């Protein structure tokens, strides 16, 4: 697994460095006013931060990338890799998708309404 320490300094463009600096400053200010630990932090804190500081999806993803970058650089686990944070960002969590209960109930009702015939008794 690669960390920020593994990346050469030129790996981040000057624009990315500036954006990450602004995102990190926002996060550390939010942590101070919220009484949360900025480094290391946990996924729940990141989720609260994303909720308290709404922004466009791309901005939220960049903010989490900046938080992860600082954590990796300090030798800490990246909170943005947690399934909960990934899901909040609209990213794959690596876990099987869950059907909402209403949809699961509707599918079950529809399946029960199908006529019972030979094909349901192992004809295939």
Image (tube, rainbow, N blue to C red):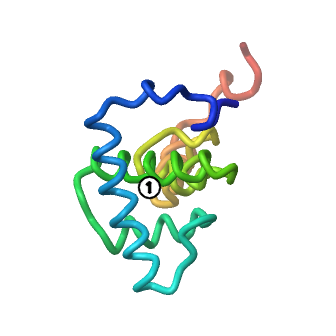
Viewer-proximal residue among 25 and 83: 25
Q: Residue at x 45, y 72 (%)?
A: 48
| Residue found at the very far top of the displayed protein | 124
Q: How many marks?
A: 1
Q: Residue at x 46, y 76 (%)?
A: 31
Image height check: is 12 above or below 83? Answer: above
Image height check: is 13 above or below 4? Answer: above
Quadrant for the C terminus, please. top right
Q: Quadrant of residue 50?
A: bottom left
Q: Residue at x 68, y 28 (%)?
A: 120
Q: Position of residue 118 (x, y in %)?
A: 68, 23
Q: Position of residue 64 (x, y in %)?
A: 44, 52
Q: Is residue 91 left or right of residue 98?
A: left
**Judging from the image, what secondary structure is the residue with disc 1 in?**
helix
Q: Which residue is mark 1?
A: 88
| Residue found at the very far front of the displayed protein | 9
Q: Residue at x 47, y 66 (%)?
A: 47
Q: Position of residue 59 (x, y in %)?
A: 28, 49
Quadrant for the N terminus, please. top right
Q: Position of residue 100 (x, y in %)?
A: 49, 56
Viewer-proximal residue among 114 and 2: 2
On the question of residue 109 being in view, the answer is: no
| Residue found at the very far right of the displayed protein | 122
Q: Quadrant of residue 18?
A: top left
Viewer-proximal residue among 17 and 95: 17
Image height check: is 12 above or below 55? Answer: above
On the question of residue 124 being in view, the answer is: yes
Image height check: is 30 above or below 23? Answer: below
Crowding at dot 1, Cα within 10 Å, few <14 / some 14-19 / many 20+, comes out as some
């Amino acid at each position: 697994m690669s960390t920020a320490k593994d990346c050469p300094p030129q790996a981040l463009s000057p624009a990315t460095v500036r954006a990450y600096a602004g995102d990190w400053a926002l996060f550390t200010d939010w942590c101070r006013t919220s009484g949360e630990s900025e480094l290391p932090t946990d996924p729940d804190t990141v989720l609260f931060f994303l909720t308290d500081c709404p922004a466009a999806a791309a901005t939220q993803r960049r903010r989490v990338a900046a938080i992860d970058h600082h954590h990796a650089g300090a030798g800490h686990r990246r909170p943005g890799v947690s399934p909960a944070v990934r899901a909040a960002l609209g990213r794959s969590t690596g876990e099987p998708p869950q059907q909402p209960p209403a949809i699961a109930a509707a599918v079950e009702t529809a399946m029960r309404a199908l006529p019972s015939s030979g094909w349901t008794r192992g004809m295939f």
